[in-house]
Image: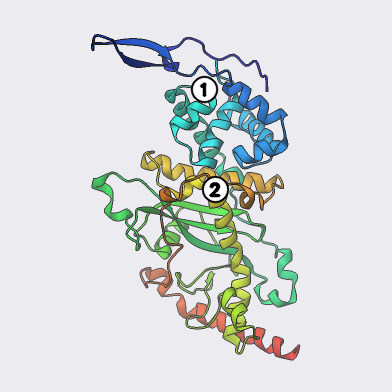
Amino acid sequence: MNPNYRRRSENEDEFVFLIHPTLEGSSSSTKMPIHTSILTGSTYMHETLTGHEVLCQRRFHMEREIFQALVQKLCEKCKLEDGTYVSVEEQVAIFLYTISKNASNRTVQDIFQHSGSTVSYYFRVVLNAITSLSCNYIRLPSLHPHRILRQRKFAYFQNCLGAIDGTHFPMTIPPGQQDPYRNRKQGLSQNCMVACDFDLKFVHVHPGWEGSASDARVLQDSLKHGFSVPPRKFYLVDAGYANTPQFIAPYRGTRYHLQEQGRVQQRPQSAKELFNLRHAQLRNHVERIIGILKKRYPILKAATSYDIDTQVDISMACCVMHNFIRLHDGDMSLPDRCTEDINESNMEDVPDGDTKYNVDVPLFDSMRQAGNDMRDAMANAMWADYNARR
């Protein structure tokens, strides 16, 4: 990054008109520069990329070498180029700072010393570039059993590919379009289905559904748009989904949360309890990945002023960024150490996912008995093996 990267000095985009009252009480318009700080965007980036390694982590929620790898990838795959006044590094930084801090356009203007239109333009350029990489970085998982399934306690989950959950992201919706987006907590949100593997990578993301839609309906739609489950394979889901051979849910009415198991401090007392415990231990991966995603990118916790399509694109871009960081061995504990820059008053309370299946998808309804038979067979075999080893 060149610290002397050329910026515009006199351009109408970098100026605002300020009205100054005169002593006589009249007013006049004077063209005055507002972005005149010596701490320019190029200086900010030079400091970030050559200073202490923690700076990049604090500002963009990723390690410096991963930031540089991202810039290189966007140049190679998406043909991003230096603008006349804004380098590719700055363009990417504008985007990352915005989603990592839920920063307003005005805040980003002050940080990088560019006009609001410049900030908006490059935010969109980088957003489009990153979402275009979704097919490269969000892919269906390997069909080979994951190494975690080699543990004896998970022996009956050999055909499991990962876990699925629905998560809500707050949205700003025009008044005339709000009703479908109103979730069960009466807030406005999109319902996004995510599937992950046991390496904490997203293998499918299906954003954009209205907050009132059930998790099962969003899953059904994802199956019509690119998501698939190979024969004899399955994903783990929670009680908000139907239990089918492809999507195995826990037993309802039976203790299964890991916290509940920890509180009672006792061994499982039945095949159903044991199954639910193992199920929860594996399905915890999807809860972890959603938690990491929202901590790394607080923009997903608050409604923003972007249009609907842009808000949906941002959620996809954040998932792509998560996978990119994961594939480059980024520190998954980093979001826990980053300060929460978003004001709590701006954070929206949204549902985590459905608490029960609403019997609203005929395809899933017809497969529930087969799913129940499959789950019973797994649970009974698991219980017999568990008792034989006690």
Residue 381: mark: none
Sequence-first tag of 2 and 1: 1
Residue 364 placement (x, y as % from top left) = 43, 71
Residue 10 or residue 375, whichever sits in front = 10
Residue 62 or residue 81, whichever sits in front = 62
Q: Is residue 277 above or below residue 72?
A: below
Quarter of the figure that contains the N terminus: top right
- 387 sits to left or right of 128: right
Task: Examine the image and state in which quarter residue 100 appears.
Answer: top right
- 160 sits to left or right of 185: right
Secondary structure under the numbered disc 1 in the rendered image: loop
Asked whether the beta carbons under mark 2 and mark 1 sit within 8 Å of each other, the answer is no
Residue 113: mark: 1
Quarter of the figure that contains the C terminus: bottom right
Q: Is residue 233 visible?
A: no
Q: Residues within 10 Å of mark 2 (few under 14, many from 20)?
A: some
Three-letter residue code for mark 1: Gln
- 71 sits to left or right of 178: right
Secondary structure under the numbered disc 2 in the rendered image: loop
Residue 85 placement (x, y as % from top left) = 55, 16
Residue 93 placement (x, y as % from top left) = 58, 32
Three-letter residue code for mark 2: Glu
Q: Is residue 9 above or below residue 372?
A: above
State the residue at coordinates (32%, 56%): 182
Task: Examine the image and state in which quarter residue 154 appears.
Answer: bottom right
Q: Residues within 10 Å of mark 1 (few under 14, many from 20)?
A: many
3D distance between C-alphas at marks 2 and 1: 24 Å
Q: Is residue 172 visible?
A: yes
Find disc 2 in the rendering and name its residue.
340
Residue 341 or residue 351, whichever sits in front = 341
